[in-house]
Image: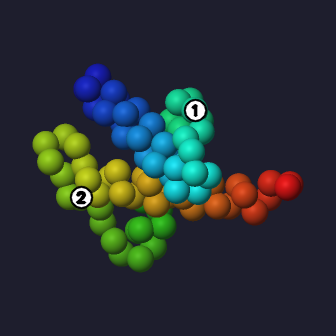
Amino acid sequence: MLWSYILYIVIGAVAGWIAGKIIKGRGLGFWINLIVGIIGGVLGGWVFGLFGIKANASIGNFSIGGLITAVVGAIILLWVISLFKKK
């Protein structure tokens, strides 16, 4: 059970970092990466669900589909935030 939570944290941090690299060209810092990645995972799962896509390609406890879903959701989240951010 503890390993599941650690895995969620690691996947969230990695997803946030990847999204930060794609959108901003750099990471956003560990805590922001983590928050963006976790929210992105939820958002990505919701968006993919709207299209009937189920991310369940897993290797052991690590889910490739879950990572992809979190990255896509984090990118969407960062893009929406950038729309409201003053320049």
Estimate how packed mark 2 is, as few (under 14), some (14 to 19) or many (20 or more) residues with alpha carbons within 10 Å: few
Residue located beneath label 2 in the image: 56
Image quarter in which the C terminus is found: bottom right
Q: Position of residue 68 (x, y in %)?
A: 36, 57
Farthest residue, direction right: 86
Farthest residue, direction top: 2
Circle 1: residue type: Gly
From mark 2 to mark 1, how far is it between C-alphas? 28 Å
Residue at 68% from the left image edge and 61% from the top image edge = 80
Residue located beneath label 1 in the image: 29
Residue at 53% from the left image edge and 30% from the top image edge = 30
Residue at 59% from the left image edge and 39% from the top image edge = 28
Cβ–Cβ below 8 Å for labels 2 and 1?
no
Q: Nearer the viewer, residue 72 or 19?
A: 19
Q: Is residue 43 left or right of residue 85?
A: left
Q: Nearer the viewer, residue 54 or 10?
A: 10
Farthest residue, direction bottom: 51
The answer, for residue 21, to whether it is visible in the render is yes
Image quarter in which the N terminus is found: top left
Q: Is residue 31 left or right of residue 59?
A: right
Residue at 72% from the left image edge and 58% from the top image edge = 82
Q: Earlier in the sequence, mark 2 or mark 1?
A: 1
Q: Position of residue 74 (x, y in %)?
A: 52, 53
Q: Quadrant of residue 54?
A: bottom left
Estimate how packed mark 1 is, as few (under 14), some (14 to 19) or many (20 or more) residues with alpha carbons within 10 Å: few
Q: Secondary structure at mark 1?
A: loop
